Image (cartoon, coloured by chain):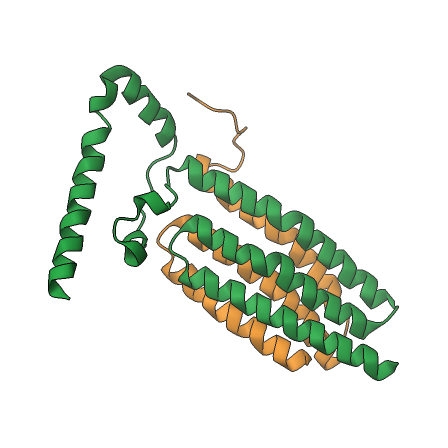
Amino acid sequence: MDTFFMLLSGVLLIVGAFFYLTGAIGLVRMPDVFTRMQASGISDTVGVGFLMAGMIVAAGPTLIAVKLAIILAVVVFISPVATHALAQAAMHAGIDPVLASNRVLGLGAGLKPLETKPAHAPVKKRANKRKAGKAAARPVQRASRAKAKTRASAKGKRS
Amino acid sequence: MFEIATFAVLAALALAVYRALSGPTVFDRVLAANFIGTGAILLLALVGFITGRPEFLDIGILYALLNVIGTLAVLKFWRYGDLSHSGEEEG
C-alpha cells in the first residue's frame, strides 16, 4: 500500500510538472497579452493542482497535507482574481486583442509589438466618433491594412 | 520524482523570467511576475519535501497571499500613478 501511494504521488507530480511546463512555454510563445494569460492559466490551475495533489499524497494524513491544501485553495481562488484584474487593466489601457480577423497573413501577423496607449483610450474613441463621425477612426485602419498588405506581397515575392 | 518536478518548475521559471525581461507591455511583465510568484511557492514546497523540512510551507502560504496583493498594487499604480487613489473615474 505504501508503494502504491508513492507511485500515485510520482505520477501526479510528473503530470503536474508537464502541465506547468506547458503553461510556461505558452507564456513565451503566445503572441498577445490575453493569450499569454490563458496559457498561464493552465499552470495556475492544472499544473499547481496536480503538483499539490502529488505532494499531498506523498505527505499522507498529516498537518503538512493540510498546509498544502490551504496553499492550493489560496492559489486556486486568488489567481483568477489577479488574472481578471490584469485583463481588465490591459483592456482599459487600450490593448486590442489579436483576433483572427485582424490577422492578414496568418501566423506572423499578430507578432508585431503592441504599443501601450494612454489610459481612458476607449472613452476618447467614442467621443471622437460622436463628434467627427465615421471619418475620424477609419482612415487609420485602412492605412495600416494597406501597409500590412504591401508587407504581405513583399514577403510573397521574396519567397 | 520530487527532483524531476523541481527541475520542471525551474525551467518554467526561466521561461517566465525571459517573458518578464522581454515583455513588450507592462502587463506581460506583471503576468510573468505573477507566474514567478506561483512558481516560487511550488519550489518552496518541493524543496521542503526534498530536504525533509516542511517548515517551508508556512512561507509558501505567506507568498501566496502576498502574490495577489503585489499584482493588484502594481496594476493600480500603473493605472492611477498613486496607490492611495480612491479608484473613482475622473471623467
Residue A145, position as x, y percentages in the image: 20, 42
The one of A40 and B19 positioned closer to us in this rendering: A40
Q: Residue at x 28, y 21 (%)?
A: A128
Figure quadrant of the N terminus of chain A: bottom right
* Residue most extreme to the bottom: A3
* Residue most extreme to the top: A131
In this picture, is B5 found above or below A126?
Answer: below
Residue A81, position as x, y percentages in the image: 61, 44
Residue A50, position as x, y percentages in the image: 69, 66
In this picture, is B70 found above or below A124?
Answer: below
Q: Is residue B16 something one can see in this rendering?
A: no
| Residue B61 location, quadrant | bottom right
Q: Residue at x 21, y 25 (%)?
A: A136
Residue B6 shown left or right of residue A102 in the figure: right
Chain A painted colour: green
In this picture, is B21 found above or below A148?
Answer: below
The one of A110 and B23 positioned closer to us in this rendering: A110
Q: Residue at x 45, y 52 (%)?
A: A35
Chain B painted colour: orange
In this picture, is B79 found above or below B32?
Answer: above
Residue A127 shown left or right of residue A77 in the figure: left
| Residue A91 location, quadrant | top left
Figure quadrant of the C terminus of chain A: bottom left
| Residue A64 location, quadrant | bottom right
Residue B43, position as x, y percentages in the image: 63, 70
The one of B37 and A152 positioned closer to us in this rendering: A152
Residue B30 shown left or right of residue A2 in the figure: left
Q: Residue at x 15, y 60 (%)?
A: A156
